[in-house]
Image: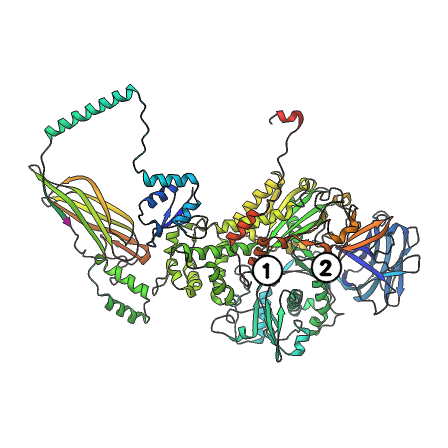
Amino acid sequence: MSLYYLPLLVRSDRYFIAKLDSDHLAGTEPAIDFNFVIPAEERVHIPVFTLEDPSRAVLTQMAPDGQQDIPLSECQFALQRQGDDVVLLITKTGNFSVEPAYDEALGIRLDYSADLKRITLGYYRHTVEPRQLRILVTLKTGDDQSYSARFQVAVTKARATHRVVIDFGSEASQVGIRNCGPQAAVLQYDILENIMSKVSLLDRSRHWRRDDFLNNEPGQPMLFRSFYAVKKSMTPAERQNFPFNFHTDWREDEVRLFITRQEVAATQAHFRDNYEIIPNLKLGIEKSLQLIIGNYTEDYSIRTHKKDLISAILLRLLRLMISTRPDFQQGGLIVTLLVPNIYTQHDVFDLLHELRQHTNTMLASLHILPQQLPVEYETISESDAAFMGFQQTHPEHIQLSNGDMALVIDCGKGTTDISMVMADDNENYSSFFRTGFAGAGNVLSYSLVEDFLTLALKAIPGSNKLSVKEFIGRHVQDQSLTVDVLGFLQLIENIKKRYNQLPPLSLMTFAGLSEESDSTERTIGNLHRDLSTVLPYAEAILRNRNVRWDDEVTGLVSKATDCIVRSMISSISDVLTKDIRKRIKVVMLTGRAFYFDELRVRLETALCQLLGNTVRIHTVAQGHAINNKNVAIHGAFSGAYKITDFTGIPVDKKEGLSRNNDVLNNNMFLYRGIKIQPGNDILYNTSVVRRNNQQLKSFRNKTIDIYFTRDNIYLRLMENQQVKDVRSLYSVLTGAAEVYSPIQDMKAISMFPSYQGELASVHSIYQDMQRMPEPAMPAPAKRSGILQFFQF
Amino acid sequence: MEKYLFNDGTNVIREVQSREALNALLAGVTDKEKVSIWIYNTHEWMSYAAFMGTQPASEKNTEKQKKTDTSPVLKPAPRSLRWLRNAAFIFIAIAGILLVYNFTRVKWTPLEPVTVVPSRPDNSPFVNIDSLVQVIEWTRGQKLDKVTRTNLGIRNNWPDQILLKAQASRDSSAAGTRFHDLLITLDNATGYQLDEVVAEWSVWKEQRLVSSDTIRFEKINYTAPLQRSIVGEVRGDSLSVKVERIRARVFSFCYAADKKSNSGNLTDRWFCR
């Protein structure tokens, strides 16, 4: 039984690869593949689905049953009604034709423009009537077989529809909103302020301030610190839907969006007895929650249930927004999630699936019917969005011609995301390479913690008796985020933010710093005498001071910076073939970790070595309305339709994309596969497919086609234009990152302080990285022939 | 340039800015087994043996050589007549000077050496610390921790724990009295390292000040008295010495001889941050 894939452009801003399954599959009623929201305006033709360039586009056949691809140029296109459903009927006739049609009752029309080379299924009415439609894309082949993709499409009024972008960060989250009506501006949603208003309604006796919440980011009201808590005990009935039971009392919800400082104070036990705090959900920490369900306990792995927990929090954020904004409660929502590049395609689609599945439950908790508020979900890579945001706000810095590329490195708190985007001659950008790793600002923070503790516990006392690793394990990791730990970590973050401005003190002068209080003469120098008070006393002594310690004593901060830079360069050096290196004209550095000057400077030096001195490197300056954190939010609204739900493109490890003219012309890579040369390995993000893999035995010495679909990436072998063999790329991937221990160590450090296992010292990670093979740097070009005798 | 931290086993940590300075410190230590060295850009202390193990062979040879050969290395003299001639000239010149000096110098008769200890300064009277602590605790309504009590005691009764002494040899002649081989000794018995002590020594003649100078001690350890020799001689009837200034951040102590107190608080005159 065959299987076809067809790329559709939804609205004008989203590519979606439709999967056309056989209509004759025995069993259950075919399910809806996906749902879309189409904001429509009166008397304006709005495209719903568009097929671009039908003379070259192809229905790709992906089952090894000997059937061929079907070019759209051999098909007839027609519009049909089947009851309440609309069908875009594609019939294989051998000739290309389009039967324009208009269903006045529904407002759906089918058009073809030979000039624009587009077949458009659109919506047009004098007045927009919000309605939900099922639209089928059906292929009829000559042998009475038919294959369909089924979509739920909600037509809504543009002014009643909103786009929401959620940046779910490791350190802090933020939300942007824009109305789909004309000339709407991007607004940021103050999550904490709205939570405070909800909590105040429940307890009018208490007046809340932002400082009362752990989630407050001082000086940045639009950022919401990622501190969430999960309820530990529940009834068996609640466990059925955990964590998607939405409670009317936000304080008693099974997933708490907020935590107050009072709740984590040492004198309070109630909160800690009932809730477990999880600060770094995005990376999927290796931690289990002990849930108490009725009379038994359950070991609930955060890593395995990452998508459930993240979906639960995202739905609660949406729930908060909908409940606090009356204009959100009717119309439609298109929700875009910024996802890190370490998420695989499966991670992304699992997340989207969870969100879609539980949205109706969330709406029901607000007494909103699903048809009142249809919600669509999509994702965009964080680094891609950051680039688009920068391109929109600083267009003079990004002027790329057809085929030119930009390298984007987004270095946040937990993850570093790297993309390469390519421009076409219309200044549309598509993302063709994405990679990422866990290891960013938190590695720097950890190095500062380790540096300080090494000085206080070893260098100043003059002996190696005290172990920094043991101290961190016992007094930080095992403490479950007490106020002392949080206060100390906040101190470290403050020092990191102002690192370059703070003058370093010599070791002995630093040891002499004391607390500014009459009844005590505690100094840094005598901190080591009582380990249980190191963290609170360190915070008390260094708070409000404008100095720091000498980092040259241990060199740990410098080593951590080197490790991050090296990881970044290693991530891209394999894919930087000669042709791609030449095409990269611009580098963009974004993310709050780059406010640490040393990291930025070292990376810029390494990039100039790798890409040449002519490459332009841009950063987002600190202290502006558009900053390193929110530039991605603005970019996610850009409607860059070629930057879609995909998460990376496999490339030939040796040739790069030099043999794939389709990609370099930026025309067809969503239609045709990428050809990998025989004998070469395939590089996909941080993973590698070895050509000698047993599963690829039949592909040996042949050219493999690689096809993107929305839920998989297929390797396809063709013989006589018929599909001979199909494999999933994921089944043959070897995670290159899994091989290297320092990369795993950096991932563990990224989850500090919640990581339960042993954390390697920055020094040992640095040494391990030094032993790893150096990333390939280009050799200086030698002049050949007569030119080598001339010096210019 | 490599930098180091040096611990001679007394837990007084010194920051060393160069390899030469480290070598100088190492040369002054007799028991090298107690020495720990921290090389900048590493994360722990190393014993002396481990440190030497990390050094290149040439450095180790130099160290070994230093142990056995303490005489200054002289350039071997070129064997030439010119060298002999220069040596002969120098010898004759020295001999001539010595002869002239011998017949013109004043003859001095050695007397008993003199030892001078400064009296307790007026601005640091004796304080009963136990009573003082009781009063402070009662006034503030909270107990002072042990470190604070100790430091308060040292600050108020520092003359009992920071001892200054001057010793000199004395000669007399028809021209008067002279002092030479002046040796200033500073004994720190506080148990803390002092950052700086400035002492002033003075020579008097007929009740009038003839000469005066200050001498500065830095990073004064508490394990052994520190001595400083003053080269040269001075002529006068008597010698005196006093403490001008002391500074010790570790127990928040700043003393100055020309002040009554730092902040006007006479129960803790010399407290500073």
Residue drawn at x 59%, y 44% as measured from the top left: A774
Image spot of residue A707 (x, y percent): 78, 52
Q: Quadrant of the N terminus of chain B?
A: top left
Residue A181's tag is 2
Query: Label 1 lies in what chain?
Result: A
Q: Main secondary structure of the magenta part?
A: loop
Whether callout 2 and callout 1 share a subunit is answered: yes
A126 or A62, which is in the foreground?
A62
Instruction: Check disc 1: other Cα within 10 Å, few if <14, some if 14-19, many if 20+.
Output: many
Which is more toward the observer, B266 or A599?
A: A599
Crowd class of label 2 (few under 14; some 14 to 19; many from 20; radius 10 Å): some
Q: Residue at x 64, y 43 (%)?
A: A586
The residue that label 1 is drawn on is A170
Residue A703 higher or lower than A338, as above or below: above
Percent position (x, y) of residue A479? 50, 67
The tag earlier along the polypeptide, 2 or 1, is 1
B138 relative to B184 in the view: left or right: right
Q: Is residue A627 visible?
A: no
Chain under disc 2: A
Asked if residue A755 lies left or right of residue B32, the reply is: right
